[in-house]
Amino acid sequence: VFEEDIKHYLASGMSDYISKPFEIKVLTQKITKHLMGIDTTSQKKDNSDEHMNAVVSYTNIDFLKQFTNNDAQKMKKYIGMFLDNAPKLLSRLEQGMTQLNYEEVKIAAHSLKPQMSYMGIDEEISHIFMIEQLAGSQTHTEQLPNLVANLKRVCEEVYRELNHISL
């Protein structure tokens, strides 16, 4: 779903949205907010340490922990695979942009998308899904350079985070 679509749906009466893969905690917070009028996310914002971590960290390995049954060896394996593969895919994506080869951009973004999900990198931060969709449809391609530059910045920060993670 494109950002402009979300804005349109919200303006038309949609209450909220949640991107996939979603965390149960986030879904529960949104349901509670809309059914009971209680915004449980605002309670966390009072805790400055948690808020700072949310702002600073691009990764959330909760999904990876769940996916691997909290097996540290498996988690290290997946993190290692990400650190090995993601830079190569990002390079392919950038090369596709340089050559205006949108099919290559789409393929690289599509391959990178699930790996980013395993590391808990939100679509709202990476925009990897939007990159894939725009490149695939070859519409609004003028947005791609900024989206790809943002993705590169996010990936570089994620690489730093994952290289310093302790399991």
Image: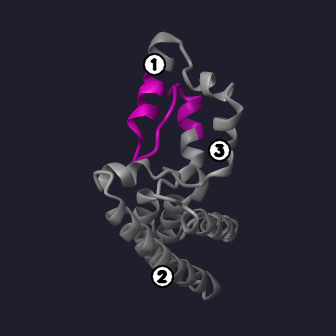
| First in sequence: mark 1 vs mark 2 | 1
Q: Are the residues at dot 1 and dot 3 in contact (C-beta closer than 8 Å)?
A: no
Which numbered mark, 3 or 2, is in the foreground of this view?
3
| First in sequence: mark 3 vs mark 2 | 3
Judged from the image, the secondary structure of the residue bearing numbered disc 2 is helix
Residue at image point 56% right, 19% down? 39
Tag shown at residue 53 = 3
Q: CA distance from mark 3 to mark 2?
A: 35 Å
Residue range (magenta):
7-31
* Residue 94 image position (x, y, % from top left): 60, 81
As shown in the figure, which amino acid type bears the numbered disc 2? Glu
- Which residue is disc 1 drawn over? 32
Front residue of 100 and 67: 67
- Which residue is disc 2 drawn over? 104
Front residue of 152 and 160: 160
* Residue 50 image position (x, y, % from top left): 63, 36
Q: Are the residues at dot 1 and dot 2 in contact (C-beta closer than 8 Å)?
A: no
Label 1 crowd (10 A; few <14 / some 14-19 / many >=20): some
Residue at image point 51% right, 59% down? 166
Tag shown at residue 103 = none
* Residue 149 image position (x, y, % from top left): 69, 70
As shown in the figure, which amino acid type bears the numbered disc 3? Asn
